[in-house]
Amino acid sequence: MDKLVRRVTLIERSGQNREAKVVYESDEEDDDDLPPHLRRMEKSVRHMLKAQVIAAQEAYERHLESAGKGGNHWLMDAPRNFMSARKKAMKEMRHAAPIRVEKNPEYDEED
């Protein structure tokens, strides 16, 4: 059976009586043993880590592009490259934060 299917329950109805019986149950452990607030926290931590990966990838790509220009362009472009990478990471963090992360107008100017 597919990994998405955790349980299949068959409900039989005869007159006023209803009988439910589990036909299939997955052997894999799931995160149901975690309390809801920890599940939300885990999801938030996962998104923050993803945002850090996005920031690192973006900074690296921008650095390669600046270094490809030759000379010391990479040095002059570094502050702007890091700020742009940070902006992209903060956008990712805002998507799944348990509390609202407000934009900082000083850093999050539209390009």
Image (cartoon, rainbow, N blue to C red):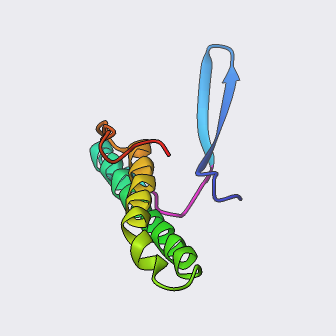
| Helix, strand or loop for the magenta stretch, by majority | loop
Residue 98 appears at what percent x and percent y?
32, 41
Nearest the eye: 32 or 58 = 58
- Quadrant position of residue 49: bottom left
Left or right: residue 61 versus residue 109 is: right
The residue under the point 53% across, 75% down is 66
Relative to 86, residue 39 above or below: above
> 21 or 107, which is in the foreground?
107
Location of the N terminus (image quadrant): bottom right
Q: Which residues are magenta?
A: 24-30
47 inside magenta stretch: no
Q: Residue at x 41, y 44 (%)?
A: 96
Q: Quadrant of residue 55?
A: bottom left
Q: Position of residue 54 (x, y in %)?
A: 47, 63
Query: In this view of the protein, which residue sits in the foreground, 91 or 12?
Result: 91
Q: Residue furthest bottom?
A: 71
Relative side of 62 to 15, left or right: left
| The magenta stretch spans residue 25 | yes
